[in-house]
Amino acid sequence: MPGADRSRRRRVGCRVTQACDSAALVRKRRLETAIATGPIAQIATSLTAIILAAAFYGVVPHPALAAWLLLAFILLAIRHTIIRAATCETLDGSEVRTHLNRIVAAKAATSIFWAASFVLFARYASGERLALLILVAALTFVGTMLLHRGVPRASFVHLTAILIGITLSALTVAGSAAIWVVLLLVPYALILARFTISQDRAFVEATIGENMRLENEQTVRLLLNEYETQAQDCLWSVGPRGRLRDVSQRLANFLGQDIEAVEGTPFGDLFIEGRQRTRLVDLLANRVPFRDEIVKLDIRGQTRIWRVSGRPKANGFVTGVLRDVTEAFRTEERVRYLALHDDLTGLANRHAFTEHLRERMGLTGDPVRRIALFYLDLDDFKAINDTFGHRTADAILCEVGWRLKSQLREADLVARLAADEFAIVIESALGDGMLIERGHRLLAAMREPFLVEDRLIEVSGSVGIARCSEEACEAEELVRRADLAIVAAKAKGRGQLALFDRALDAKVQQRRRTEQDLRVALLEGGLRVHYQPVIDIATGRTTAYEALVRWDHPERGMLPPDEFLAIAEETGLIVPLGEFVIRQALTEMAGWKGNFRLSINLSPSQIRSVDLLPTIADALAATGFDPSRIEFEITEHVILQADSSATATLDRLRASGIKIALDDFGTGYSSLSYLRRFPFDRIKIDRSFVKDLTTSASSRAIVSTVIALGRSLGMQVTAEGIEDRAQLQILGELGCDEAQGYLILEPLAASELDRVRAGLGADRGDGVLDYAAARDAILRRRKQSGQSA
């Protein structure tokens, strides 16, 4: 198989070549390391020689000391000469080997010299001089890790020579007792030798790995360059004097001239003066290969950018390839710009804002007081978009950016974070009062009408201000505080300002704890359902019970719904919470006699939930509760946010016999279209109107109108929040059907309410509860409990 033999020989030859190349690279790196550490080693050796000579002056005979010092500096001069001769970067492989061997020999000679020096000085050492000699010997012994790094041969010679020198010195000083020094030095020398081997192995692996990485990069770059070498490239050639020769038509077209006009032109004269042109001319003059040199030139009044590569030839010419990369550079610059700027306003974008804030927070000497962050949020800017269109809205945003910049210094940063959200980073030691004043200036700038396409448009904004005023904090913490401040400002209304303080943070932390505790309560059964009776005003009999959720908090006690329902709605916990109320209420009421209704509130999120109808169906099936006795209460917000699926859900509930009531009527838009769009069974008048029945004629007129409206539409009317008998009497006179409130009975747990019913004989057939009797019964029981206590 001759072919197979040749193939095998080629593979072996490749491996041998690669091994040779790696070995040559390692030798070169060893030489470079030896040269780099040479000056440090020479300085240390010189200082050590001078110190020893000074310390032993007058103790060692003068001729011997002078000869020793002269020999030390001769060795230093020889090493310096060898290292200096090896600093040329153009050494070939054999020269590298030669210089490396010379350096190793010089290092070895120096190590042997110092080993002999220890023996010499040991004969005269005592007291402080002996301590100095021991210190120098120890430092020289361990110095192999630094002085001979990358040159293991010199390191081993150094260890061996110094070990022998210290041993002989110890014998000279201590005689046979020096055996303990030897027993200590030998294992330590073995450890240093082992460490030297490991260090050199890592050095070799790192060198070979670096070489492989560079070769891979060169290969990839070569492939990419070959791929790019298409019609966009152009060949060029210059003579020994640097003038263009053999100009092609393509090169002449690149320059926008005729071939005759370009032929013989100095290549460097094509380019615009500057550092890049000077470098290219020097490379040509020195006949050094080069790649991807970037130069600029003027062609017919336009600045173009070329990428030029070239290689000298044996005949004195330099040839190469060039490419016009003007568009690529412009695209790259545009990409860089867009990566850091908002494309509409030209302001810094969120990424640039974050990087700038982190940089300033890190570089400022006193970040606690010097960095202030302003958040500005345009109020209800969506209405501008919807009313005037996106073009007008974009023009306003650009004007906002300009106004903000006009209010600030050049060093301050203005960034657009989102559609109508801006951030301003100010580096200043101003106090809180001045920051608030500056915030008001920003608000005033926003209040000035915007003139867009001959239309004056008024826009307002809210400002939140934050700084790390008490302790140093990171950029992310400052952003969090500004977020809290802008939320607080918007909660005040339009065109408001808020400065971060600890109360805002405490409120957020409390809200977060409430959310976490609520999740635990849902999982561990911390929620309770209380019931408040609804009575027929004409008869005083109980006609319904409204299920109201309560939270039995382990630390804060029994919490009313206004403490946690808003958080539940925002976090999505309202859906599982509502499902719990439905199941619990139906389960507890299923065993009660009577034809009363059970009223349960539904939130907008529950109406949109796909699990609502299955949950109700499962609860009805499990309890056997009559669907016609269930009444779900919804607010106007449900109708406002209702889509086709939510409307379909309400229709299916009514189709199953369940009643739907409009709760808190009069507190929202109170549009009659709601009553026309959906046939409610009941209207519930909000407590805010009932509260002023006895003192406000307008409240009485509103309640009278709602009652008349419900009667004309065939809907029952229930009034909430009855707290005194005068209110109840007026409602009766106005013709209201039902009443509910603390006058009748506060919400109670099912067990307590069941005891009230039993005490009144509520187990009769109709199962209704007289509200006055119930109220009296509870008062009597509380009075008896107080007396017994």
Image (cartoon, rainbow, N blue to C red):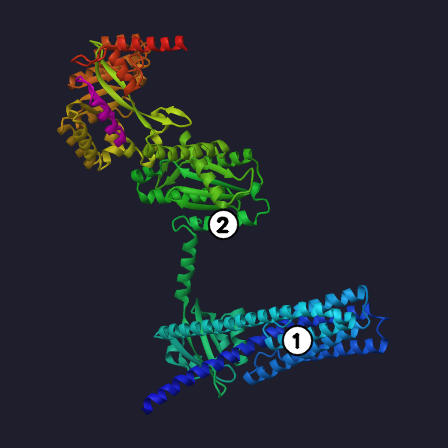
Q: Position of residue 256 (x, y in %)?
A: 40, 74
Instruction: List the residue tagged with mark 1.
Output: 160
311 over 536 or under it: above or below: below
* Residue 739: image location, x then y, percent: 25, 14
- Res 637 → quadrant: top left
> Which residue is under mark 2?
356
Magenta part of the protein: which range? 578-602
Mark 2 or 1 closer to N-term? 1
Q: Residue at x 42, y 83 (%)?
A: 14
In-image side of 280 versus 721 (left or right): right
Provide the secondary structure element on which disc 2 rests. helix
Q: Nearer the viewer, residue 300 or 763?
A: 763
* Residue at image point 55% right, 42% down: 472
| Residue 694 versus residue 660 in the image, above or below | above
Asked whether the viewer can see residue 7, the reply is yes
Q: Residue furthest front?
A: 176
* Mark 1 residue element: helix
- Would residue 512 be found to the left or right of residue 664 on screen? right
* 515 lies above or below 663: below
